[in-house]
Image: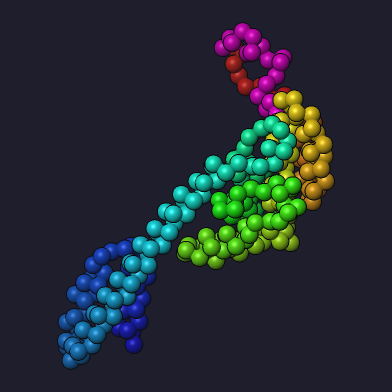
Amino acid sequence: MWITNLIFDDSACRQTGVKYQTEIFLSNFRPLLYVFGIEIYLKIFENIFRTSYTFHMKNQNKSLKNIANFIYEAGILNKTPRSGLWFLGTGAQSVSEHIFRTTVIGYALSELIPRADKNKVILLCLIHDLGESRTSDLNYVHQKYGRLAESQAVEDIAKSLPFGANLKSLHKEAKERKTLEAKIAKDADNLEWMATLREEFDKGNFKAKSWIELAYKRLKTPQAKKLGKLLTEIKPDDWWFNEKDKWFIDRKPETKKWKSK
């Protein structure tokens, strides 16, 4: 029994990918098998081990190919526009740009809410618009006439991936918004939209103000509401621009040090 268990335990083979794992096993145990007069089992075990290894390597190669395709598909989000800005009249943003800042905001919010699972929040933010690589982004006007099957798109993406079940589960959680982490991820989504709108407002699009107010009403957690209020009060360039900073006038070394407001 112990020999059989060892033969079927190919974890080392999976972890290291060593091509000659079979040969190592056989070279170590062939004398022992002959001593016990069970050489007939040698060929049986050898064939089983080689077949198992070959099957595993074929599956691994297929999985890696699917992951490579997934990487390229994610890249489509770099080119997929956020369509809400078309109706606003100004601005341009890709879905990837939106996802990145949403994830940063989600992490920041999770730091403010200690009981939240930070890793879960980050993952939910990363995949919340993943299906838009196949459905594109629909704004609120579009959605009045139907929503594209984003969940179906994610399900189709997940089918080919070794971690597909986890991907599908995370997307479902994000869309249901029942868990604390999903609520935080959605707040991050709305806060990112508010920040984008505020940037357009500061460029002269005054219509963005009423859009910001509507987005604020969708926030759920107290921490997000406080942060959202600050986003309406602080200018987008406040993090770097200070008209009182002499560096912007003389560029002298003694005024070069970063000064926070």
Q: Is residue 247 magenta?
A: yes
Taking 189 as reference, is 74 left or right?
left
Q: Which residues are magenta?
A: 236-253
Q: Is residue 27 visible?
A: yes
Residue 181: which quarter of the image? bottom right
Q: Residue at x 25, y 80 (%)?
A: 47
The residue most toward the front is: 145
Question: Does residue 164 lie above or below 123 as drawn?
Answer: below
Q: Nearer the viewer, residue 95 or 4?
A: 95
Q: What x and y, as percent, mark residue 103?
A: 62, 46
The answer to whether residue 140 is above or below residue 231 is below
- The question of residue 244 being in magenta is answered with yes
Compare residues 247 and 96 and report the one nearer the observer: 96
Question: Residue 89: where, in percent of width, then height?
Answer: 71, 33
**Image position of 175 (left or right of 1):** right
Residue at the spot x=48%, y=62% of the render?
A: 161
Q: Residue at x 33, y 62 (%)?
A: 16
Q: Residue furthest bottom?
A: 37
Spot occupied by residue 219 in the image (x, y as percentages of width and height): 79, 48
